[in-house]
Image: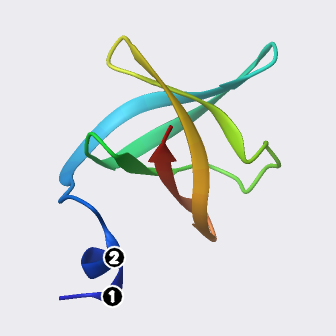
Amino acid sequence: MPTSERRRAGSRRRVLKSGAIEFGHEAIPCTVRNLSPQGACIEVNSPLWFPDHFVLAVDGERHACRVIWKKERRIGLGFD
């Protein structure tokens, strides 16, 4: 089992959904790669700057979240 899986509070299910990173009056499109009640992994088209705390909008739901890790275009999130 990978180290990241052992550190997670719960298992995440793999998905492929469109989402948006929302902060201020901005919305940056993203792809949600996995999702759980505790967090998500998203992918952005380019490694643009955005804050460490923002709202992830996916499937008509909005989740306040914080960045846990970043690796190139992938970003691990924890929900607040």
Give residue 41's position: percent from left, percent from top: 42, 54
Give residue 4's position: percent from left, percent from top: 35, 78
15 lies left or right of 78: left
Give residue 62's position: percent from left, percent from top: 46, 19
The numbered mark at residue 7 is: 2
Element type at marker 2? helix
The numbered mark at residue 71 is: none
Q: Specify the quadrant that holds the N terminus.
A: bottom left
Element type at marker 1? helix
In the image, what residue type sits under mark 1? Answer: Thr
Q: Residue at x 21, y 58 (%)?
A: 10
**Position of 67 relative to 23 (above/below):** below
Circle 1 or circle 2, nearest the eye: 2
Marks 1 & 2, CB-CB < 8 Å contact: yes
Count of all numbered marks drawn on residues in the image: 2
Q: Residue at x 38, y 47 (%)?
A: 39
The numbered mark at residue 3 is: 1
16 lies left or right of 56: left
Give residue 58's position: percent from left, percent from top: 39, 24
Q: Quadrant of residue 37?
A: top left
Q: Residue at x 26, y 76 (%)?
A: 5
